[in-house]
Image (tube, grey):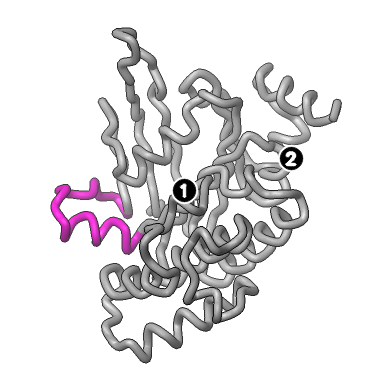
Amino acid sequence: MSVLEVRNISHTYIKNKQQIHALKSVSFSLEKGEIMGVVGESGCGKSTLLKQISGIETPDSGDILIHGSVPEGKNLKSRRKRYSTMQMIFQNPLESFDPRRKIITSMEENLRFLAGIISKKEQEKIIYSYMEKVDLKKDLLLRYPRELSGGQCQRAAIARAIMIQPEILLCDEITSALDVIVQDKIIRQLKELVRQQEISVIFVSHDIALVSSFCDRIMVMLNGECVEQGNTKDIMTAPQSEYTKVLLDSVLEL
């Protein structure tokens, strides 16, 4: 059974009294330990897809199943159960943290509410361990998010998400605001962590070159639809969709 299955989900926004079809019958499955990239130009529906999967938004139609079951309810208990299974890392790391709280406080809350770890000593042990795994010094934990660089804050966000041992990790353009050197470091650290813990990942990006170096499988989106999906090697060497060919050509021209 797949860890995650998305069945024909669609979603429409209303903007200026006009309907915008952000998603149109999108379907795919995600296996344990698999890293799937989702690529396409801005506005193609990539981020909307993650919002539907995470529960931030609700599909107009279709189903999202985790281990074969549709997540039930929107009360606090149901949301905690969902977020203990699934974590999301956002494009802007500063928006991932409460600006009024120190980094360590946000991390402690994740462990307490989502992993059920009450002991301060145990929380500290886990937090310090994951800070080391993402190559961050412990003293950064006592700072506020605004006092960290973008790269530091994003690595802290990765540590906070992965330390609760989620089964699914959703990554929304997590390196787009960072310079190339920091981007490369974060991707290498993330890949090592998800492989160690066999986490299933959906990695959204407009950068098909980055996705091809990181992901096992790729789904290409255009105007809210999946136009092609398959293993990375096949997509990169023998694309079937004309749109995918255009994306690849644009990379080769750079």
Which residue lies most toward the right here? 253
Q: Is residue 221 above or below residue 166?
A: above
Q: Is residue 5 left or right of residue 236?
A: left
**Disc 1 element:** strand
| Image position, residue 52 (x, y; %) | 34, 38
Q: Disc 1 designates what residue?
A: 30
| Image position, residue 209 (x, y; %) | 74, 40
Decide which of 11, 98 is in the foreground and name it: 98
Point out the tag, 2 or 1, that comes first from the N-terminus. Answer: 1
| Image position, residue 90 (x, y; %) | 48, 48
Q: Is residue 82 left or right of residue 26?
A: left
Q: Amino acid at mark 1?
A: Leu
Q: Is residue 182 above or below residue 54?
A: below
> What stretch of residues is rendered in magenta?
67-85
Residue drawn at 74 percent across, 35 percent down: 236
Q: Which mark is residue 209?
A: 2
Looking at the rendered image, the quarter that the N terminus falls into is bottom left
Gap in angstroms between the C-alphas marked 2 and 1: 21 Å
| Image position, residue 6 (x, y; %) | 37, 38
Mark 1, other Cα within 10 Å: few <14 / some 14–19 / many ≥20: many
